[in-house]
Image (tube, rainbow, N blue to C red):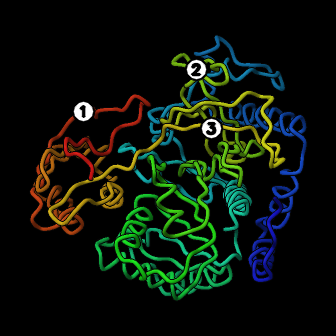
């Protein structure tokens, strides 16, 4: 299960160490920890949880007050605290916290969720956490033979704003060192783009394909409908952003790749869990995170029972992500469950996360993530959004906004949505104070009465 280091990745490690990022030492530690025993991993998880909790209480009065209000008093310095004694940290808590937080001295940058839940969240992230996140992702992708240095094609989103020349050069060098190429998944993704992506696969001949589930499924269907177009079948595929629906793993295996690996993550933490080659659940990265499944009161549910997923991030000292609810429902395996692969990480056996939201257009169905990608640009004014659809050529966009609608505010949103969804799409707007939620608690991005085809 140990990932092979490709020669070109040494350059990236040396660069990170020269800049003082401790990239090499973090990568070595992350690699070594996957060879711990289950008991050693459990002790490591408990130690890191307590350290981050007490650090956050001491550093953030806002969080300390939430803890005090929930448990009646603050713990003494160094006093062990059980998870269930602590409040669940919600998206609304984080939005309120970020609004009053001054930029921390150790903040690398202010990050933001993609908005696929229709309620974007902003947070600060440290360089240490950034290095840990990328090392964890690379370790997990190594289980799927898609780690840094392995020839991989990413069906991913290009930057909405064109970066300057220096940034483009730096990105190009990084991609070349990583042996990766990217196909922009957020252009108008019709048959012409699907064919162009297939031809890129044929030219580049990747070992692995990584990308957004909806777009990869679209490409697989296109390949199935055009026999002979795809001349290169990759070995593995890693999905991102959305879960697979019934029959889609089989579709991807029969058309694009030999094997499909499910990943589970979010923008707040990057990778939370990942399948190994046994495909029996998500191995949770408990050397970087604590993952719990809880009831509506924040109490842990029994293994095998469904509950709300909350996550604690050990290495992001700039944000108190402790028992943070990401809006998914999951089921935890029994603590004594052991995967035959030998990894020490506990298993999350199922996740009811983001569905593949689809907006129907006169030109065919399109991923709801196109809406997310468009709405990111208006977060200075829009606090939440949701698409309601009852006809192929008409949508209503519900908006939670900081001020009243004006033509100057709505005009750019409508223009960009029409660019994605087609000029013939009729778009109406409705200002609301609440958005409809799924049973997981997540806001539904698209509510449609149109049957999927």
Q: Nearer the viewer, residue 376 or 261?
A: 261
Are there few (<14), some (14-19), or many (20+) residues within 10 Å of tag 2? many
Looking at the image, residue 169 lies above or below residue 243:
below
Q: Are marks 2 and 1 in contact (CB under 8 Å)?
A: no
Q: Which residue is mark 2?
A: 298
- Using residue 176 as the reference point, say whether residue 250 is left or right of it: left
Q: Residues within 10 Å of mark 3 (few under 14, many from 20)?
A: many
Q: Which residue occupies 73% across, 63% down?
A: 142
Q: Secondary structure at mark 1?
A: loop
Q: Nearer the viewer, residue 259 or 227?
A: 227
Q: Residue pushed farthest top?
A: 72
Earlier sequence position, callout 2 versus callout 1: 2
- Identify the residue position indicated by label 3 in the image: 320
Residue 217 shows up from this direction:
yes
> How far apart, in angstroms, are the residues tagged by discs 1 and 3?
27 Å
Label 3 near label 1: C-beta < 8 Å?
Answer: no
- From the viewer's perspective, is residue 120 above or below residue 220? above
Res. 214 image quadrant: bottom left
C-alpha gap between disc 3 and disc 2: 17 Å
Residue that label 1 marks: 433
Question: Residue at (61%, 71%) from the top-left corner?
Answer: 208
Q: Quadrant of the N terminus?
A: bottom right
For residue 439, side relative to residue 417 (left or right): right
| Identity of the residue drawn at 33% across and 72% down | 187
Quick one: SS at disc 3? loop
Question: Which tag is nearer the camera, tag 3 or tag 2?
Answer: 2
Name the spot of residue 63 as percent of width and height, x first.
60, 30
Percent across and percent down for residue 331 are 60, 30
């Amino acid at each position: 299960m140990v990932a092979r280091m490709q020669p070109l990745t040494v350059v990236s490690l040396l660069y990170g160490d020269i800049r003082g990022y401790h990239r090499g030492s973090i990568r070595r530690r992350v690699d070594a920890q996957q060879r711990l025993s289950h008991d050693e991993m459990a002790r490591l998880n408990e130690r890191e949880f307590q350290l981050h909790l007490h650090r956050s209480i001491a550093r953030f009065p806002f969080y300390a007050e939430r803890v005090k209000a929930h448990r009646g008093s603050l713990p003494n310095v160094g006093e062990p605290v059980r998870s269930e004694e602590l409040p669940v940290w919600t998206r609304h808590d984080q939005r309120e916290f970020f609004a009053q937080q001054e930029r921390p001295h150790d903040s690398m940058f202010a990050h933001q969720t993609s908005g696929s839940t229709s309620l974007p969240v902003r947070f600060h992230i440290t360089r240490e956490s950034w290095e840990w996140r990328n090392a964890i992702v690379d370790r997990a992708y190594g289980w799927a033979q898609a780690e840094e240095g392995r020839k991989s094609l990413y069906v991913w989103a290009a930057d909405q704003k064109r970066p300057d020349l220096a940034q483009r050069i730096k990105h190009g060098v990084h991609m070349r060192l990583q042996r990766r190429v990217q196909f922009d998944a957020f252009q108008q993704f019709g048959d012409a783009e699907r064919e162009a992506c297939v031809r890129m696969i044929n030219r580049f001949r990747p070992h692995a394909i990584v990308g957004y589930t909806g777009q990869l499924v679209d490409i697989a269907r296109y390949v199935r409908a055009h026999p002979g177009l795809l001349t290169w079948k990759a070995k593995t595929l890693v999905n991102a952003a959305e879960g697979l629906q019934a029959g889609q793993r089989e579709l991807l295996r029969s058309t694009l790749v030999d094997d499909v690996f499910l990943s589970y993550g979010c923008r707040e933490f990057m990778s939370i869990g990942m399948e190994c080659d046994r495909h029996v659940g998500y191995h949770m990265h408990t050397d970087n995170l604590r993952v719990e499944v809880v009831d509506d009161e924040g109490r842990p549910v029994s293994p095998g029972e469904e509950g709300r997923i909350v996550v604690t991030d050990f290495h992001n000292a700039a944000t108190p992500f402790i028992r943070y609810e990401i809006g998914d429902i999951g089921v935890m395996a029994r603590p004594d469950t052991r995967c035959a692969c030998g990894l020490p990480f506990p298993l999350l056996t199922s996740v009811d996360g983001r569905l593949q939201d689809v907006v129907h257009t006169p030109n065919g169905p399109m991923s709801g993530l196109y809406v997310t990608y468009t709405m990111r640009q208006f977060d200075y004014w829009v606090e939440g959004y949701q698409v309601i659809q009852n006809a192929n050529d008409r949508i209503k966009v519900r908006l939670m906004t900081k001020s009243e609608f004006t033509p100057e505010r709505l005009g750019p949103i409508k223009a960009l949505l029409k660019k994605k969804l087609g000029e013939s799409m009729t778009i109406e707007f409705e200002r609301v104070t609440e958005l409809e939620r799924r049973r997981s608690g997540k806001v539904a991005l698209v509510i449609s009465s149109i049957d999927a085809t």
